Image (cartoon, grey):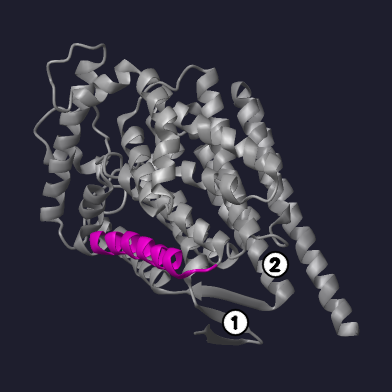
Amino acid sequence: MTRYKLNTNRLSRIYLSYIFVVISFIIYMAASIHKHPDQSLWISYWAIVFLITIGIPKNPELSLFVFILLAYGTPRYGIQKEIFYHLNILNMLCLIIFLGLFLRIKQTQKMDIPINMISKIELLFIFWVSISLIASLRFDLIKDHISINHNPIQYFQGFFLFIIASRFLKNASAGLLIAYGACFALLIRGGFLWWNKALYLSSDIGIFSAVVFPLCLLIVSHHKQIAIRLLFGLFACFFPVLILLTQNRTAGVTFAAVIMYLFFLSTHKLKILVGSIPIIVAIAIAFPTAYWNRFRVIWDRGSDHFTVNFDIGTILERLKLWDIGFEMFKKNIVWGVGPGNYGYFLTQYSDQKLSSSHLVAHNSVVSMAAEMGVVGLILYLSLCLVVVYSLLRVIVKSENPLRTASCKYISASIIGCFCAGMFSSRQDFVFMYLLFGWAVALTAKKSIVWKDKTIKIVGE
């Protein structure tokens, strides 16, 4: 009894220390308002969301929810993102999450991590990212040349969230929490861009809408409360509208790929076709002519709409960027030029003028090949294929309706991530690795368990 009391008191002190760290960082964020008074609303939002991390030791899945709200509820471009990264919010969040999970392990005296082929390939992949980063030190790189939106640290953040998701997203409520976070983050950022009339040609919000759409359908189809299902049903209608407002081609193609994949998995194809006729007619009538013209220039360069030069220019520039990436790959076939270094080497591999000296490849496969060589490319493609294959196996064999639905909609989101990556670099998209971890939680049959100071593998 005395020993139990000592352990309880010790854990209480550790938990108080944890809360102190959380509150200290919230105060640090709030104090930055005096330096950026025009962004006080966003800083307040970050601080309020960060407050949720106090509950991580009891509910570790909250860490994923908070990360999504912070990373994807904040605009990808602009002063908000610069302040966000200047304050090191995501790095500090990862530290807070680590401390919270450490406290949970101390409380439970147990730790288990599901493993299967997905987790093994992910481990090899992050190992190769590290090797490629070390190999890139052979180049004389300029300090701070890496884009904040394509920083190599995101691979490690993704791996960290992958581990957490694989461990704590086994039950239905935890999984739905991730779907909630993604939907709310999208609505917050989409609402902000709409209010500032900045939705038009906004690529990232449109792409993320297509990726999150299946997760919204998961809530609509399997939540127990009808009110919640109706609410997210409205949200699901809003996401395609958001894509139409952005008029981004990659978002449109990604959404089409997601819809076709979901239709392929459906067991009621005829009913869906008949029921969707009014929707198809409505979209055909309301589809913006300007958006259609953005696609039409791909096969008809004679168009004279307002953005024709921009539309053709982005196509030609992408082709050039892909060609440069292929050249980088051929000359650095083993190690690559290093994660995040594609933009730095652009001018060295191109004799033509580009719109910027610091562009990304706008293709995840090309970017992965150029930055991490043939091994990195093989591991990345293998990871994507094995994840989708593992989820499809569960969809076919599982008799649990919610588990089957979760695998169905998660795989659709992953298909969206990969499709978007064909036209807009998303190989370091942290959200995708979180989905990979969720896939492990639903498909793994074995776990590495630490208990009573021993480590063993349990399961089938």
Residue 15 at x, y percent in the picture: 77, 62
Could you tell me if residue 280 is visible in this image? yes
Asked if the stretch drawn in magenta spans residue 137, the answer is no
Q: Amino acid at mark 2?
A: Leu
Q: Nearer the viewer, residue 422 or 425?
A: 422
Residue 100 at x, y percent in the picture: 67, 61
Relative horizontal placement of residue 1, taking residue 172 as reference (left or right): right
Residue 319 at x, y percent in the picture: 15, 36
Give residue 128's quadrant in the image.
Answer: bottom left
The residue carrying mark 2 is: 103
Q: Main secondary structure of the magenta part?
A: helix
Label 1–label 2 contact, CB within 8 A: no
Q: Residue at x 73, y 62 (%)?
A: 58
- Number of marks in the image? 2
User: Is 66 placed above or below 81 here?
Assistant: below
Q: Nearer the viewer, residue 310 or 390?
A: 390
Q: Residue at x 26, y 61 (%)?
A: 376
Asked if the stretch drawn in magenta spans residue 395, the answer is yes
Q: Which residues are magenta?
A: 377-399
Q: Amino acid at mark 1?
A: Trp
The residue carrying mark 1 is: 450
Which structural element holds mark 1?
A: strand
State how far apart marks 1 and 2 are (Cα).
Answer: 15 Å
Could you tell me if residue 157 is visible in this image? no
Q: Residue at x 76, y 59 (%)?
A: 17
Relative horizontal placement of residue 77, taking residue 137 as reference (left or right): right
